[in-house]
Amino acid sequence: MPTPRKDYMDENIVSETLLSVSDCLCKQYPDTSILWGNSEVKKERYMDQLGLSLNTVQLFEQWMEEHRNTGDVLFPQVFSDLHTAEDFLKRFLIHLPGIRIISIGLPEQYIVDFLKDVELFNSKNPEPYGVEKMLSQHHPPGIEGAKKIGYEVLGFDSGSFHSYLCNGLERDLHQHFNFSPNRYGLIDSIEEADRYSDYCNALGEKTESVLWFPWAIFEHKKRRANKN
């Protein structure tokens, strides 16, 4: 979901609201670490936050387990296709007005390096992460009918992403490249995103210990629920 600009971000550079793949910045659904975890307290708090009844919660968990078994939902928060994501939203989260379905795509020339990096640092993970699995199987992002809203410089870490905005790098990029993000807090062109990811990687320990890549971000229109 879009989120208000964080206090540590430069208000003269970043717009009032932004959309990010990083769960440090934007809420993402479903949070499978809670659903498939052992804490009933966290689970109840999570469902209260979503405004779901006990009956809906049970259907929610059943749906998630069924689609995990069929490979439609991948660990930790990846839908393998647009239809599954739309079905999930329609069944359980359609009441959240600001929710969005987004797809991400990594340009072809970076995929080999990304997979090598994941293999090097996540080799102990018993189950491949959803993003890793889809890229290794050359599964294209579901972007039919979607709008490309920009690029985000992201670093993959244990199944989720860090964003350049998590590290307050908008100031550095503005100073060195006269960078100005679009209204989503994203980068307009692949050329810019490529340049900024190189810059972030060159910073080394001054940022998160990840390999930064320029990811394309696509937004899907939320379809209205059918009225019976």
Image (cartoon, rainbow, N blue to C red):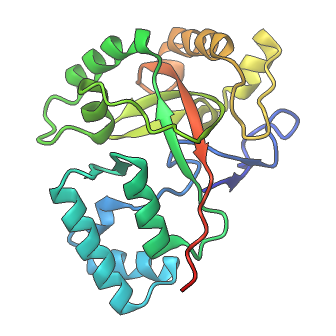
Image quarter of the N terminus: bottom right
Residue 149 to residue 89: above or below: above
Q: Residue at x 73, y 41 (%)?
A: 184
Residue 213 to residue 45: above or below: above
Q: Residue at x 73, y 18 (%)?
A: 173
Q: Residue furthest front?
A: 228
- Please give left or right for residue 43 compared with residue 23 in the image: left
- Please give left or right for residue 1 compared with residue 133 in the image: right
Residue 171 spot, x, y in % from top left? 76, 25
Residue 83 to residue 179: above or below: below
Q: Residue 69's image quarter? A: bottom left
Pick the front one: 160 or 166: 160
Residue 99 spot, x, y in % from top left? 60, 61
- Please give left or right for residue 124 compared with residue 19 in the image: left
User: How many labels, in total?
Assistant: 0
Residue 169 in view: yes
Image quarter of the C terminus: bottom right
Q: Residue furthest right?
A: 12
Pick the front one: 27 or 206: 27
Residue 133 spot, x, y in % from top left? 24, 34
Q: Residue at x 41, y 24 (%)?
A: 210
Pick the front one: 35 or 60: 60
Q: Residue 111's image quarter? A: top left
Residue 28 spot, x, y in % from top left? 49, 56
Residue 36 in view: no
Q: Residue at x 67, y 26 (%)?
A: 169
